[in-house]
Image (cartoon, helix red, strand yellow):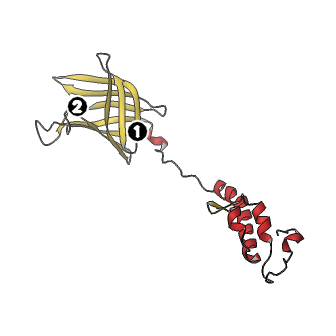
Amino acid sequence: MLHLPKHLYHQPTGLPMKRCRLFDFAQRNAHFAIAGGCIRSGLLRQVVPCSMILRVFLLALTLSIATPAAWAQRPTKSVPKLATSFFTTYSYLSYSILDKGTSPEPMAAQGVGGTLTLRPNGTYQKRLTLSANGGVMNFDQDGRFTFTGDRISFSYTDKKGQPRTDQGRFQLRNGLLTLTIDGYPAGNKSIYTLRQQ
Protein backbone atom coordinates (compact mmCIF):
# COMPACT_ATOMS: atom_id res chain seq x y z
CA MET A 1 0.00 0.00 0.00
CA LEU A 2 1.26 3.50 -0.87
CA HIS A 3 1.93 5.81 2.14
CA LEU A 4 2.06 9.52 1.40
CA PRO A 5 3.87 12.12 3.59
CA LYS A 6 1.65 13.51 6.34
CA HIS A 7 2.14 17.10 5.24
CA LEU A 8 0.28 16.28 2.03
CA TYR A 9 -2.86 15.88 4.05
CA HIS A 10 -2.57 19.37 5.61
CA GLN A 11 -5.92 21.14 5.40
CA PRO A 12 -5.43 24.72 4.08
CA THR A 13 -7.34 27.44 5.89
CA GLY A 14 -10.63 28.35 4.25
CA LEU A 15 -10.97 25.26 2.06
CA PRO A 16 -13.77 22.72 2.40
CA MET A 17 -13.03 19.61 4.43
CA LYS A 18 -12.88 17.39 1.34
CA ARG A 19 -10.19 19.55 -0.29
CA CYS A 20 -6.43 19.28 0.23
CA ARG A 21 -3.07 20.37 -1.19
CA LEU A 22 -2.17 17.00 -2.64
CA PHE A 23 -1.95 18.74 -6.02
CA ASP A 24 1.35 20.28 -4.82
CA PHE A 25 2.86 16.81 -4.55
CA ALA A 26 1.46 15.77 -7.93
CA GLN A 27 2.78 18.99 -9.44
CA ARG A 28 6.29 18.11 -8.33
CA ASN A 29 5.89 14.70 -9.87
CA ALA A 30 4.15 15.79 -13.06
CA HIS A 31 6.42 13.67 -15.23
CA PHE A 32 4.30 10.52 -14.76
CA ALA A 33 2.60 9.55 -18.02
CA ILE A 34 -1.06 8.56 -17.80
CA ALA A 35 -2.90 7.04 -20.79
CA GLY A 36 -0.57 8.64 -23.31
CA GLY A 37 -0.69 12.11 -21.71
CA CYS A 38 1.10 13.88 -18.88
CA ILE A 39 -0.05 15.63 -15.72
CA ARG A 40 0.95 19.13 -16.63
CA SER A 41 1.75 21.61 -13.89
CA GLY A 42 -0.54 24.20 -15.42
CA LEU A 43 -3.51 21.91 -14.93
CA LEU A 44 -2.69 21.30 -11.29
CA ARG A 45 -2.80 24.84 -10.06
CA GLN A 46 -6.47 24.45 -9.24
CA VAL A 47 -7.60 22.83 -6.03
CA VAL A 48 -8.64 19.26 -6.84
CA PRO A 49 -10.56 16.80 -4.63
CA CYS A 50 -8.10 14.76 -2.59
CA SER A 51 -9.66 11.42 -3.48
CA MET A 52 -9.45 12.17 -7.22
CA ILE A 53 -5.79 13.20 -7.05
CA LEU A 54 -4.96 10.08 -5.06
CA ARG A 55 -6.68 7.83 -7.62
CA VAL A 56 -4.83 9.53 -10.48
CA PHE A 57 -1.50 9.23 -8.70
CA LEU A 58 -2.05 5.54 -7.89
CA LEU A 59 -3.06 4.87 -11.50
CA ALA A 60 0.13 6.51 -12.79
CA LEU A 61 2.26 4.53 -10.36
CA THR A 62 0.54 1.26 -11.32
CA LEU A 63 0.97 1.89 -15.04
CA SER A 64 4.64 2.81 -14.68
CA ILE A 65 5.33 -0.48 -12.87
CA ALA A 66 2.91 -2.97 -14.42
CA THR A 67 2.91 -1.94 -18.09
CA PRO A 68 6.47 -3.11 -19.01
CA ALA A 69 5.88 -6.47 -17.32
CA ALA A 70 2.54 -6.92 -19.06
CA TRP A 71 4.10 -6.26 -22.48
CA ALA A 72 6.94 -8.65 -21.72
CA GLN A 73 4.45 -11.41 -20.97
CA ARG A 74 2.57 -11.00 -24.26
CA PRO A 75 2.94 -14.14 -26.40
CA THR A 76 4.87 -13.69 -29.64
CA LYS A 77 3.11 -14.59 -32.85
CA SER A 78 4.48 -17.80 -34.27
CA VAL A 79 5.73 -17.85 -37.86
CA PRO A 80 4.15 -20.61 -39.94
CA LYS A 81 6.69 -23.13 -41.20
CA LEU A 82 6.54 -26.11 -43.49
CA ALA A 83 6.81 -29.53 -41.93
CA THR A 84 10.25 -31.11 -41.95
CA SER A 85 8.90 -33.80 -44.29
CA PHE A 86 8.71 -31.15 -47.07
CA PHE A 87 12.49 -31.27 -47.35
CA THR A 88 13.07 -34.68 -48.88
CA THR A 89 13.39 -36.49 -52.21
CA TYR A 90 10.40 -36.83 -54.56
CA SER A 91 9.85 -39.11 -57.55
CA TYR A 92 8.34 -37.60 -60.72
CA LEU A 93 4.96 -39.14 -61.59
CA SER A 94 3.77 -36.89 -64.41
CA TYR A 95 4.70 -33.81 -66.40
CA SER A 96 2.37 -31.84 -68.65
CA ILE A 97 2.59 -28.59 -70.59
CA LEU A 98 -0.21 -26.07 -71.04
CA ASP A 99 0.45 -24.16 -74.28
CA LYS A 100 -2.64 -22.07 -74.95
CA GLY A 101 -1.45 -21.29 -78.46
CA THR A 102 -1.68 -25.01 -79.28
CA SER A 103 -4.42 -26.47 -77.08
CA PRO A 104 -6.65 -25.31 -74.20
CA GLU A 105 -5.85 -28.56 -72.38
CA PRO A 106 -2.47 -29.59 -70.92
CA MET A 107 -0.47 -32.08 -72.98
CA ALA A 108 1.08 -34.93 -70.99
CA ALA A 109 4.69 -35.96 -71.59
CA GLN A 110 5.59 -39.63 -72.02
CA GLY A 111 7.97 -41.76 -69.98
CA VAL A 112 8.26 -39.38 -67.02
CA GLY A 113 10.80 -40.42 -64.39
CA GLY A 114 13.57 -39.16 -62.19
CA THR A 115 13.73 -37.37 -58.86
CA LEU A 116 13.65 -33.93 -57.25
CA THR A 117 15.47 -33.35 -53.95
CA LEU A 118 14.62 -30.31 -51.79
CA ARG A 119 17.08 -29.69 -48.96
CA PRO A 120 16.57 -27.63 -45.75
CA ASN A 121 19.52 -25.38 -46.68
CA GLY A 122 17.63 -24.08 -49.74
CA THR A 123 19.43 -26.11 -52.42
CA TYR A 124 17.77 -28.53 -54.80
CA GLN A 125 18.72 -31.22 -57.27
CA LYS A 126 16.49 -32.01 -60.26
CA ARG A 127 16.96 -35.18 -62.27
CA LEU A 128 13.98 -35.37 -64.64
CA THR A 129 13.86 -37.94 -67.44
CA LEU A 130 11.44 -38.10 -70.40
CA SER A 131 10.98 -40.58 -73.23
CA ALA A 132 11.37 -39.06 -76.69
CA ASN A 133 12.27 -40.38 -80.17
CA GLY A 134 12.78 -43.89 -78.87
CA GLY A 135 15.26 -42.77 -76.24
CA VAL A 136 15.54 -41.03 -72.91
CA MET A 137 16.12 -37.31 -72.45
CA ASN A 138 17.69 -36.02 -69.24
CA PHE A 139 16.88 -32.66 -67.71
CA ASP A 140 19.30 -31.94 -64.88
CA GLN A 141 19.33 -28.86 -62.69
CA ASP A 142 21.21 -27.91 -59.53
CA GLY A 143 20.40 -24.63 -57.84
CA ARG A 144 18.56 -22.91 -55.05
CA PHE A 145 14.88 -22.56 -54.23
CA THR A 146 12.85 -20.18 -52.07
CA PHE A 147 9.19 -20.12 -51.09
CA THR A 148 6.69 -17.71 -49.56
CA GLY A 149 3.20 -18.95 -48.80
CA ASP A 150 2.32 -21.20 -51.72
CA ARG A 151 4.74 -19.47 -54.11
CA ILE A 152 8.05 -21.14 -54.98
CA SER A 153 10.97 -20.23 -57.20
CA PHE A 154 13.93 -22.21 -58.55
CA SER A 155 17.14 -20.39 -59.49
CA TYR A 156 19.80 -22.15 -61.56
CA THR A 157 22.29 -21.77 -64.42
CA ASP A 158 21.19 -23.07 -67.82
CA LYS A 159 23.36 -25.00 -70.29
CA LYS A 160 24.56 -21.73 -71.80
CA GLY A 161 25.82 -20.51 -68.43
CA GLN A 162 23.04 -17.94 -68.05
CA PRO A 163 21.23 -17.49 -64.72
CA ARG A 164 17.54 -18.35 -64.81
CA THR A 165 14.67 -18.43 -62.36
CA ASP A 166 11.46 -20.42 -62.71
CA GLN A 167 8.55 -19.32 -60.54
CA GLY A 168 5.16 -20.78 -59.74
CA ARG A 169 3.00 -22.39 -57.07
CA PHE A 170 3.25 -25.58 -55.08
CA GLN A 171 0.92 -27.78 -53.06
CA LEU A 172 1.87 -30.67 -50.78
CA ARG A 173 -0.94 -32.98 -49.71
CA ASN A 174 -0.78 -36.56 -48.47
CA GLY A 175 2.76 -36.98 -49.74
CA LEU A 176 1.93 -35.69 -53.23
CA LEU A 177 3.70 -32.53 -54.41
CA THR A 178 2.22 -30.52 -57.28
CA LEU A 179 4.37 -27.85 -58.92
CA THR A 180 2.76 -25.40 -61.35
CA ILE A 181 5.51 -23.35 -62.99
CA ASP A 182 4.69 -20.19 -64.93
CA GLY A 183 5.57 -20.35 -68.63
CA TYR A 184 6.03 -17.88 -71.45
CA PRO A 185 4.05 -16.11 -72.74
CA ALA A 186 1.85 -15.45 -69.71
CA GLY A 187 -0.80 -18.10 -69.23
CA ASN A 188 1.33 -21.05 -70.29
CA LYS A 189 2.34 -23.47 -67.56
CA SER A 190 4.37 -26.56 -66.77
CA ILE A 191 2.69 -28.91 -64.30
CA TYR A 192 4.63 -31.56 -62.35
CA THR A 193 3.27 -34.19 -59.99
CA LEU A 194 5.66 -35.92 -57.61
CA ARG A 195 5.48 -38.34 -54.70
CA GLN A 196 7.62 -38.40 -51.59
CA GLN A 197 9.99 -41.35 -51.52
* SS class, disc 1: strand
Residue 44, above or below 170: below
* SS class, disc 2: loop
Q: Which residue lies furthest to the left in this view?
A: 102
Q: Where is residue 147 in the image (x, y as percent from the top left)?
A: 40, 38
In this rendering, would 14 be left or right of 121? right
The nearer-to-camera label among 1 and 2 is 1
- For label 2, the residue is 111
In this rendering, would 64 be left or right of 181? right
Which image quarter is the N terminus in? bottom right
Q: Quadrant of residue 40?
A: bottom right
Q: Which residue lies furthest to the right in this view?
A: 6
Mark 2 surroundings within 10 Å by alpha-carbon count, few (fewer than 14), some (14 through 19), many (20 or more): some
Q: Residue 147 carries which label?
A: 1
Q: Where is residue 65 in the image (x, y as percent from the top left)?
A: 73, 59
Q: In which quarter of the image is residue 116?
A: top left
Q: Position of residue 180 (x, y in %)?
A: 28, 40
Residue closer to the observer: 2 or 147 = 2
Residue closer to the observer: 7 or 118 = 7
Q: How far separated are the C-alphas under marks 1 and 2?
A: 29 Å
Q: Position of residue 61 (x, y in %)?
A: 74, 63
Q: What amino acid is labelled 2 in the image?
A: Gly
Q: Residue 177 carries which label?
A: none
Q: How many labels does the image show?
A: 2
Q: Measuring 29% from the left and 17% from the top, which residue is drawn there?
A: 159
Q: What amino acid is labelled 1 in the image?
A: Phe
Which image quarter is the C terminus in? top left
Residue 46, above or below 143: below
Q: Measuring 30% from the left and 28% from the top, which residue is drawn there?
A: 128
